[in-house]
Amino acid sequence: MSQIRTPSLVIIETGVANLASVRSLAERLGLQPIVTSDPEEVVRAPFVLLPGVGAFGPAMHKLRERGLDAAIRSRVAEGRPIAGICLGMQLFFEASEESEGVQGLRLLPGKVKRLSGGLPLPQLGWNRIEPEPGSRLLQAGWVYFANSYGVGIEQNFNEGAADTSKAAFPRFDSISLATTTYGSAFISAIEAWRDDRPVLLLCQFHPELSGSFGKNLFARWLELASERRRA
């Protein structure tokens, strides 16, 4: 009798993240969490997660040092699903005020900025996300945040989203956002689709600390992004 293999979720080891809660999320979803810094594993895995706690500059240094930045870009260019959490979401952008002069992964346009509005930073605790009408993956709900930086809602991703002439960034057929207000509004989640598949799921909040809401969000992403559905 052939052995049934547990589906795997490759978690990128950046050296700047506490992975215990992320591993636990994978296990609650019935997945085998595999932590790696091997670029080849990142490129070929069925599902990949880029977590992050810490600063933008050191995290990007670790990714470049191990060739993981190129592996992530290659994966997105091929339309293979990848998720990012907290700092892991921020790394997908061009740069961050937190580490001036450090270039991000440049998979989405825009710069990460310090949250404004005069409230204490970091934002620690529960807050609500509100998705745009028409979002296919994101839903409204209460989630757990731990952040001082984010991307402003003025960034327009859908303008020319399918324009392949913008060679600096990969092509997506559509991009939908969720926003949150903490002093001022910022982007709290992003879903980016290509060929009827959510290539990116990026969360400024921590789904692994957000109870059943976070678990259900990742379960939907895994189902919608699966190779079986695409076949």
Image (spheres, rainbow, N blue to C red):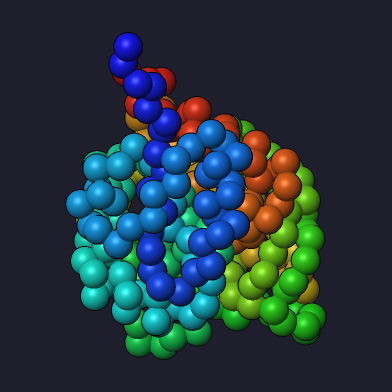
Q: Is residue 142 left or right of residue 11?
A: right
> Residue at horizontal 53%, vertical 67%?
18
Residue 28 visible at all: yes
Q: Quarter of the image containing the C terminus?
A: top left
Q: Position of residue 90 (x, y in %)?
A: 48, 67
- Looking at the figure, which quarter contains the N terminus? top left
Q: Could you tell whether 29 is left or right of 61 in the image?
A: right
- Name the image quarter holding residue 199: top left
**Visible in this render: residue 87?**
no
Residue located farthest toward the top when viewing the structure as drawn: 1
Callout count: 0
> Which sits in the foreground, 106 or 216?
216
Q: In this view of the protein, which residue sits in the foreground, 171 or 34?
A: 34
Of residues 8 and 75, the one drawn nearer to the viewer in this rendering: 8
Residue at the image position 23 percent from the left and 57 percent from the top = 39
Which residue is painted at 41% across and 88% down in the image?
A: 100
Q: Position of residue 17 (x, y in %)?
A: 49, 69
Residue 52 position (above or below residue 159): below
The location of residue 159, given as percent across then percent down, is 44, 50
In-image side of 168 versus 108 (left or right): left
In the image, what residue occupies the spot 32% across and 75% down?
Answer: 62
Q: Residue furthest front?
A: 1
Report which quarter residue 56 is drawn in: bottom left
- Please say if 227 is above or below 130: above
Q: Position of residue 194 (x, y in %)?
A: 37, 36
